[in-house]
Image (cartoon, rainbow, N blue to C red):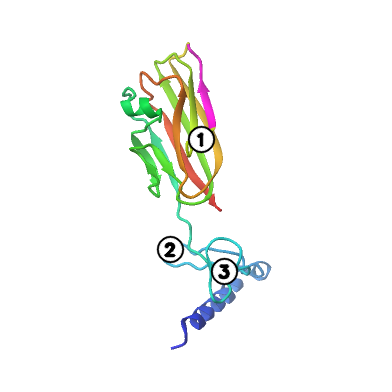
Amino acid sequence: MPPWNVMLFHVLVTFTLTFGSVLGQDQAQNVTDPFILEGKCLVVCDSDPTSGMGRTSILGMSVRSGVGKVAFSAIRDNNLEPSELSNRTMVIFFDRMLVNIGYNFDIEKSTFLAPWTGIYSFSFNVVKTYSRQSLQVSLMVNGWPVISAFAGDKDVTREAATNSALVHMEKGDEVYLKLERGNLMGGWKYSTFSGFLVFPL
């Protein structure tokens, strides 16, 4: 039986030729561009083994597995008053998940943990109910505010602090919403917090 590296080389060459013929003459010249086969197997071929993520095989090609999909959307489904924990930490808690692909959002802590380094999109909509105090809500990354939103109309009993942004995050970074000013006495039902991985780096 031939060595595994020879067999791998044969498979890659065969696939490249076949793939090139399917793409046609105009696109065949780009068959060395990185690509990912999703499923139980994967191969990424790269003419420059130093580029991208992953490891370099003995054939001088970069090999990596596909990055999984990441997305979450949490909502506040009841109108309970702020708890002792939320009053102490000022973290805005949510109680129901609409989407949690990758299971990177901890509903009990209402905190998202980045599974990959990359660009993430976040948006939030925090509704104050029957509170005439001005609100300031911040998106926190590792304890530091990145963006904030305000709801300051004292004559409106229902108003939302809303904002969104793209954020560069490292693997393991932690994201949550924090009430920086005001209070949520009366509850914050219908509030939402969502995010997803745009692309890995």
First in residue order: circle 2 vs circle 1: 2
Write the residue at 55% across / 37% down.
Answer: 165
Q: Residues within 10 Å of mark 2 (few under 14, many from 20)?
A: few
Of residues 194 and 174, the one drawn nearer to the viewer in this rendering: 174
Q: Mark 3 points at which residue?
A: 45
Q: Residue at x 34, y 36 (%)?
A: 96
User: Earlier along the polypeptide chain: callout 3 or callout 2?
Assistant: 2
Image position, residue 122 (x, y; %)? 50, 38
Magenta residues, start to end: 147-154
Asked whether 52 or 144 is in front, the reply is 144
Q: Residues within 10 Å of mark 3 (few under 14, many from 20)?
A: many
The x, y position of residue 189, in whole percent, is 37, 26
Spatial distance from mark 2 to mark 1, Cα to Cα?
Answer: 38 Å
Q: Does 61 sit left or right of 42 as displayed?
A: right
Q: Can residue 78 be seen in this view?
A: no
Name the residue beneath numbered marker 2: 39
Q: Which numbered circle lies on residue 144?
A: 1
Q: Would residue 1 appear left or right of 45 to someone viewing this image?
A: left
Tell me the chief SS of the magenta region.
strand
Q: Which of marks 3 and 1 is in front?
A: 1
- The vertical placement of 123 against 150, above or below, is below
Q: What residue type is labelled 3?
A: Cys
